[in-house]
Amino acid sequence: MYETILYEVSEGVAILTMNRPDKFNAFNERMNKEITDALKQAQKDPEVRCILLTGAGRAFNAGQDLGDVLEGDVDFGGFLRNRYNPMILQFQKTEKPIIAAINGVAAGAGMSIALACDIRLASDKASLVNAFVNIGLVPDSGGCYYLPRIVGMGKALELAMTGEKVPAEEALRLGLVNQVYPTEQFWEESLAYARKLAALPTRGIGLIKRTMYKGLELGLEETLEYEAYAQEIAGQTADYKEGVNAFMEKRAPRFTGR
Ligand code: T3D
């Protein structure tokens, strides 16, 4: 059913692979829509307890397919509002952990979607490029929202204004990625990480995600109130009961995601 991505669910993990390797997995309209749709599908599917986003071939994603915007006037506002913005919003709306497995270069909007994921794992051959300035554009697809929140305003401005490539090890030092793995073990390690998250209390993790992102926008008092609200929901889950029982019985918990 999908043309530009691959989607499969295995052992609680939805693996979403951007699949235009000859274009470095650059976005066309169909890919924007298919990623949005796949995230919605993963949200609805009770079997899915973690989402792993990666790229086919050498690259993670090189941003907008520049071949598609070469001719004619581009309505940039409409372009972003109709295609990219709904896709980026869907990352936060999805109340399951989303991991970017950055297998190669992530550039332009390809870097932005990596930043919109909750956890970023990188191969030691990967890099991130805030490439927008190199063609005279502004970071979009949430780049101006996530980048300064992740690395701080000073570094964010530097990366956005210079458009320089950040290699994986440097990205780790900056906190742009959470882990770097050698290329040979990269996929195995990424899958293991995703499976580990998929075995944890999925509803609790969804609430952690929602409450953390809310906290970015709210003051202390409102955040405290939101935490109390989220905890009321988390405290009703089967996984909370299982967690407490397992602790008292001195055994490993068996979370079901409910
Ligand atoms: O209208 C709008 O643009 C609004 C939307 C904005 C959203 C955006 O994402 S704007 C930013 C768009 N992306 C870029 O500007 C990145 C352009 N690409 C690069 O800077 C470099 O290709 C990379 C840093 C990503 C990788 O460099 P390198 O040296 O490893 O590879 P390469 O040789 O440059 O590229 C490899 C192939 O991928 C090549 O094709 P070929 O010659 O082997 O047939 C190249 O043309 C293709 N490719 C890479 N990026 C894109 C692309 N093809 C189409 N669109 C791309 N964005």
Image (cartoon, rainbow, N blue to C red):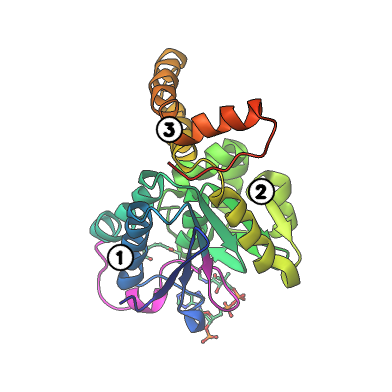
Magenta: main secondary structure: loop
> Quick check: 8 above or below 202?
below
Q: Amino acid at mark 3?
A: Thr
| Separation (CA) of disc 2 from disc 3 | 29 Å
Name, please, the residue furthest toward the front: 249
Q: Amino acid at mark 1?
A: Lys
Q: How many marks?
A: 3
The residue at which mark 2 appears reads as: 178
The residue at which mark 1 appears reads as: 33
Q: Residue at x 47, y 52 (%)?
A: 49
Say which mark, if any, is on residue 237.
Answer: 3
How many neighbours does mark 2 have within 10 angstroms: few (below 14), some (14-19), or many (20 or more)?
Answer: some
Mark earlier in primary sequence (2, 1): 1
Cβ at disc 1 under 8 Å from ligand 1: no
Q: Quadrant of residue 67?
A: bottom left
Secondary structure of residue under mark 2: loop
